[in-house]
Image (cartoon, rainbow, N blue to C red):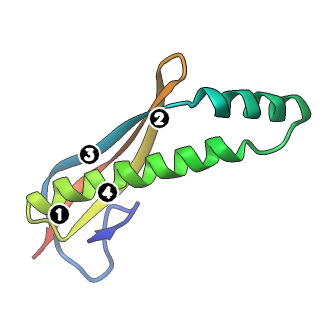
Amino acid sequence: MILVTTETISGKELETLEMVKGNTIQTRNVGRDITQGFKHLVGGELKAYTEMMNEARALATKRMVEEAEKLGADAVVCVRYASAEVMAGAAEIMAYGTAVKFK
């Protein structure tokens, strides 16, 4: 499956299928919160949260691709990511784009 952030794929004529998406909601671990809280005091990267967000993006992307595959898509164009806090300590990551077939 080809994933691109552009509207086109060089050399390919595309047939638009429909928008596809994948999402996940992740919560913070209390133990991580405590250790990352200490890190917040001295500054620097919060590596546990970076890892959590990377895993969440990968899962959201996987779910988006699965939805595109069900439609018989060859690619997803205009891929975007969005995040939002849905409640204290929980964030949603969404991946979305337009599923297309090659003509």
Q: Tag 2 or tag 3, which sits nearer the N-term?
A: 3
Can you say which quadrant of the picture contains the C terminus? Answer: bottom left
Q: Tag 4 or tag 2, which sits nearer the N-term?
A: 4
Report crowding for label 2: few under 14, some 14 to 19, many 20 or more residues within 10 A (C-alpha): some
Look at the numbered disc 2 and give the secondary structure of its residue.
Answer: strand
Which numbered disc, 1 or 2, marks the residue closer to the eye? 2
Taking 100 as reference, is 61 left or right? right
Which numbered disc, 1 or 4, marks the residue closer to the eye? 4
Q: CA distance from mark 1 to mark 4?
A: 17 Å
Report the amino acid beneath label 3.
Lys
Residue 83 - label: 2
Rendered position, 79 above or below 29:
below
Look at the numbered disc 1 and give the secondary structure of its residue.
Answer: strand
Residue 32 - label: none
The residue to which callout 1 is attached is: 100
Residue 21 - label: 3
Report the amino acid beneath label 4.
Lys
Report the amino acid beneath label 2.
Ser
Taking 12 as reference, is 62 left or right? right
Taking 6 as reference, is 18 left or right? left
Rendered position, 30 above or below 23:
above
For image coordinates 21% across by 48% down, the residue present is: 20
Q: CA distance from mark 3 to mark 4?
A: 10 Å
Q: Tag 2 or tag 1, which sits nearer the N-term?
A: 2
Report the amino acid beneath label 1.
Val
Q: Nearer the viewer, residue 66 or 36?
A: 36
Which numbered disc, 2 or 4, marks the residue closer to the eye? 4
Examine the image and state in which quarter residue 23 appears: top left
